[in-house]
Amino acid sequence: MANLSPFFTLLIAICCSLLGLPALAAADDGESVLHSEVSRAHNQSLFWGPYKPNLYFGVRPRVPQGLWTGLMWGKVNDFDTLRSSFRYTCEQHEGLAGYGWDEYDVRRGGIETIHDVANQVDITVSFVKVPGGAHGGSWAARIKGVPRPDAPADLQTMLTYYIAQEGGGELEIKTDGTDSGFEGDITFAGRSGTLGDYKLVVSKGIGNHPTSDHDLAARRQPGKTTIRSVQMPDEVLWQAKGVVFNQLSEGITNVANTYTTEDGPPAFLVYQLENNPGKGNLHIVQKIFEGPFEFDVLFSSSSAGKELTEADVTAQIKSNSDAFSDKFSKIFELQAPFKDDKYKSFAKNMFSNLVGGIGYFNGHQLVDRSYAPEYEEYNEGFWEETAEARARRQEKLEGPYELFTSVPSRPFFPRGFLWDEGFHLIPILEWDNDLALEIVKSWFNTMDDDGWIAREQILGAEPRSKVPEAFQVQYPHYANPPTLFLIIENFMNNLRKMNGTLPERRETLAFPESPLESAHLDFPELGEAYLRSIYPLLRLHYDWFRKTQRGDIKSYDREAFSTKEAYRWRGRSEAHCLTSGLDDYPRPQPPHPAELHVDLMSWVGFMTKSLLNIADALGMTEEVEEYKKIKNAIERNLNDLHWSEEEGCFCDATVDDFEEHTLVCHKGYISLFPFLVGLMKPDDPKLGKILDLIGDEKHLFSKHGLRSLSAQDELYGTAENYWRSPVWININYLAIVQLHDVAVQEGPFKAKATDLYRRLRKNVVDTIYKSWVDTGFAWEQYNPETGQGQRTQHFTGWTSLVVQIMAMDDVPAVGHVRDEL
Ligand SMILES: *[C@@H]1O[C@H](CO)[C@@H](O)[C@H](O)[C@H]1NC(C)=O
Ligand SMILES: *[C@@H]1O[C@H](CO)[C@@H](O)[C@H](O)[C@H]1NC(C)=O
């Protein structure tokens, strides 16, 4: 490697000093040294995190088995609250007045707040990461509680910190206590293969403790921290709430056997764990406070050298918060009309929850790989046959798989979703390029040898416990929108800017203060190496799509430019086409083997375009020619097979009673698909009609964003009404991006696109913002009439695209401006 980037030595120096390693001199095989150094540095920097996003707060490392910890709490002024409101896993119906990350950066940590109405307490968790050493570094959590304004003066809160060591290793208590508990800080010492030697301290903390003159208070001393240590099989450990209740029940039984209702002790004493520290792979640390409280959990890796102190944590919380604000203002510089400060804290919150939702999952997945001829879906009535074939149930647990991913919603969908992930990564790529690339790679590592990726990743018993049985099994003949290509496409664009191919070349490191986050951009040789390594996987996935989801042109005498390019989602039923991601969006009825789906052909066209870009960048001449041909064939066939001149939009196709090609048009998101994925040229006359449809208030345009289905459609708002009227942010985002593209180029539709861009962008942001102010949450979808957030609460997945939308340019209006909507 002759021409090392001048930044090479700099990067190595910074990475290594970051990790306390001696700087490496630039070697002859510079590129591979750079590559392995950077991936090692990433592994270290991304090692710890709140990677159990299903919990209000749960920390784990990014390795299959290791030490993990989680927080639980509840009010103990009375007996009942704890039974109904003991917090651990995020849940939708716990009546919280909002919770989530106000600031969060995967490399440094962040701050989460939880407004707990039933327990009358607001909890703040500040999480900090301190890199260093060879075992992923150290971390700490500061857990702070403040009674809510309506709380009694003597609010009593019980907290348990759950410390579990999976997969062997040692973990023991080093502090001496008394029979009833511990007075001061408690130190655990542990060792395992992946973590090396470490210390974990739960500090005494600050706060008052309840007192009682009941004689039980002499034996159970609520001023002390108590610990129960137990040995449990790994497969039970994750059921932490049940485990803690079991431990509590022993003490409760003792009380019940000793006292009557008249002379019974107060609730906080009954719920105090009987101290029983010792050996075990699980340690439950319990504290009971009265009024406000604060304590720290400090994890120090021995190889990092220095042990973390409370003062370190205080300093780090402050510097992280400053660094986050600085970086946020640079990356997501909000543009008019969203420059007001109120939008900034909203944007920070939305983005932080998206990144704070990143989890690491590891475990077995249920897959049914049995072959059934019915799965070819050749016959009329195929959906009944495939249902029967699936009912034979030959699923097996496969794996273990591992996945590093963000999640659509921490309480409701705390696992990986292929359809969502590409959208999640759009803002993440801008924030931390290399993090997004790492997640894309993790997803492609779950792909099988045929090129299939399971659309829902339910890895292990813990995620599985959240999924109804009917949805647990994955089928290797079913697809899902290939949204990860959106990230490859954006990464390519950013790379081009860095590479000088596009004019906006950066002269300096993107983020000199944290070079690791953009190493694959700052060093184009790394970026290219990434493309070279991911390209064969993308291609395999693409070939799988084209082979397994092909539509039939020839059997029905269809007239089209290409006899090949047509596609049909497998796996639909009368009511649903779940594989398309647009579940109940109306499709031709009844389902027919001759059907062709315009959204799917658009996705294949989009993949082709991305692959063409990569092949071009990597100098793969033959492939470039191949992709150009396919892309042209798809663009022509979109016109020949899916465009309705009469309706002025794209439509799904099927055949009529005479087996003749016919279009079935339900105007809505599907009608826009070729436009949404960037397959229409700015001077295409069809584009004018698509823009008319987008802007028509009788059809798609509303004060709250684009409706999924036209208000004129006979099925508008009917049945489940999931994708039959509500406003979805992922599709609105695609539309906004494409409108912007048309608006900034010269062309016949520039003025129209600019007007739509400006109004749609504002309507979508205002709708999400207002709902967030009203409810404290982001939502899965928005009501097109009222703008209210609906369905899943705390949907901080693709709804977080609002951040990206606010940071897009405020394109100046052309000519007359409309402002009534
Ligand atoms: C990442 O780091 C951990 C902890 O140091 C180590 O156990 C693991 O093998 C590393 N993984 C990779 C892929 O390098
Ligand atoms: C970067 O630039 C070089 C030289 O202009 C070119 O050969 C290469 O394909 C470019 N890489 C990308 C990813 O655009």
Image (cartoon, rainbow, N blue to C red):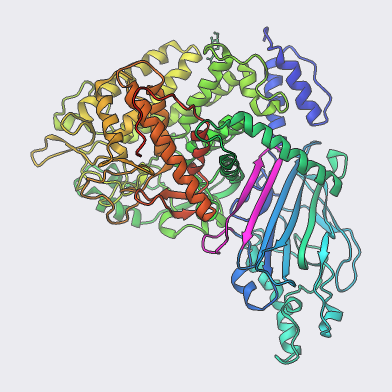
Percent position of residue 198, x then y: 83, 47
Could one spot residue 424 in this view of the protein? no
Could one spot residue 803 in this view of the protein? yes
Percent position of residue 587, x then y: 25, 44
| Residue in the foreground of this view, choosing between 86 and 9 | 86
Location of residue 471 with respect to 430 vertically, above or below = below
Residue ranking furthest to the top: 2
Magenta stretch: residue 108 in it?
yes
Q: At 39% across and 44% down in the image, what residue appears?
A: 704
Image quadrant occupied by the C terminus: top left
Magenta stretch: residue 207 in it?
no
Location of residue 427 with respect to 23 vertically, above or below = below
| Residue in the foreground of this view, choosing between 378 and 578 | 578
| Residue in the foreground of this view, choosing between 299 and 204 | 204
Which quarter of the figure has residue 641?
A: top left
Residue ranking furthest to the left: 658
Q: At 68% across and 49% down in the image, what residue appears?
A: 60
* Mark count: 0
Would residue 551 be found to the left or right of residue 189 on screen? left
| Residue in the foreground of this view, choosing between 465 and 741 | 741
Percent position of residue 580, x then y: 35, 42
Image quadrant occupied by the N terminus: top right
Residues drawn in magenta: 90-116
Ligand 1 shows up in which quadrant of the image? top right
Percent position of residue 558, x then y: 16, 28
Which quarter of the figure has residue 392?
A: bottom left
